Amino acid sequence: MNNTTTLKSQFLLRPDITFLNFGSFGACPKPVFDDYQHWQLMLEREPIQFFAFQSAENLKKSREALSSFVHCHADDIVFMSNPTTAINTIANSFPLNKGDEILTTDLEYGAMDRTWQYYCDKNGASYIRQHISLPLVSKEIFIKQFWEGYTPNTKAIFISQITSSTALKLPVEEICLEAKQRGLITIVDGAHVPAQMPLNLNQLNADIYTGACHKWMMAPKGCSFLYVAKHIQNLINPLIVSWGYKSAAPSHSQFLDYHQMNGTRDLAPYLSLPRAIQFMSDNNWAEVSANCRKLAQSNYQRFCTLLGSLPNCPISDEFLGQMCSIAIRTSAPEQLQRLLYDKYKIEIPVMRHDKAVYIRYSIQAFNSPSDLDVLYNALAEIIDTTDLITI
């Protein structure tokens, strides 16, 4: 039994589905899911003790495990249910004035675009979606194009470290360095980053960073984090005001009080995060991830050739992780996605992004070359027998 087969047996995913959409919501290995249910059972058995007397210490242990994984101080991160909540927390607090600008790319996740557009509209500011030409050619050209959107009114930059629909690793470290030199706040959407690529928040020097733990880290759904550098933590107001505001028993950190103590909620996804980290350590995840990247990248060109598209970037670790997106010409992406699932039992996203449409496959430990063969053969048959895809 090879390692892929062994690891596949550790997941609860349906065996009859070719699962190529790990990037959307991830999936829990059995030991992590068991730990998740363990924490839920503890809550149900004695909810008062769990919330009133144990939650702070348990959350601290999880934050310490996470901070070691992403390399920052444990007091600089708080748990959030998802990156959307984290960015709403930031945008709601950010001091936007009339005429201010938030500089971003036109490759960002749609929910994040809508969040920033809402708060910019509310405050008379502008959300600048700087155009990035695809395919990417080099980091240098990307950086040059990005900063062409800068003006004296730019107050902050918002950028994904790995984009969603186009699955591109962007040179965020270089962007953050330049932003610091220009006196700008840096806000990074790292939803897809933790466990898909190494993350060192101390080295990255982003002021604000959000990452999902329920994607590539394989924690239960609803486990993400918000990192805020100490020098601006006092600017970030709680999205939900609760007992942490003017607390009767304040901790050493207003940041933790404001954002960690916000009412009854299921803490089990956060508390099972150390088990997810342990699962990766037990299974030599650096090697697993490298093998997944190799499989994803080695198949990228053949799918582009099949669909008559170009890769979004040079095929290398510099721009790609465990996901690859291919531009696909279809006027009915939702119908195509349902056909792939209903007839071919393939779980894969077909996503609109502005005027373009992308099909994106994700490779995780349980995927094998045969999974991509299933997808390739299904797309070839659809091209030959329907008008859903135009070449």
Image: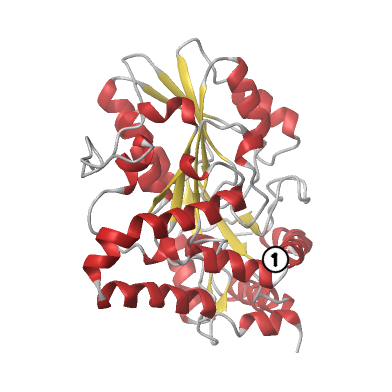
On the rendered structure, is 183 left or right of 101? right
Name above or below for residue 218 compared with residue 106.
below
Would residue 72 be visible to someone looking at this image? yes
> Which secondary structure, mark 1?
helix
Would residue 21 be visible to someone looking at this image? no
Name above or below for residue 171 compared with residue 95.
below
Residue depicted at x 74% and y 80%? 3
Residue depicted at x 42% and y 60%? 270
Where residue 386 appears, x then y in whole percent? 54, 72
On the rendered structure, is 190 left or right of 263? right
Return the residue at label 1: 285
Mark 1 residue crowding within 10 angstroms, few (<14) / some (14–19) / many (20+): some
Quadrant showing the C terminus: bottom right
Residue depicted at x 68% and y 50%? 198
The outermost residue toward the bottom is: 1
Quadrant showing the N terminus: bottom right
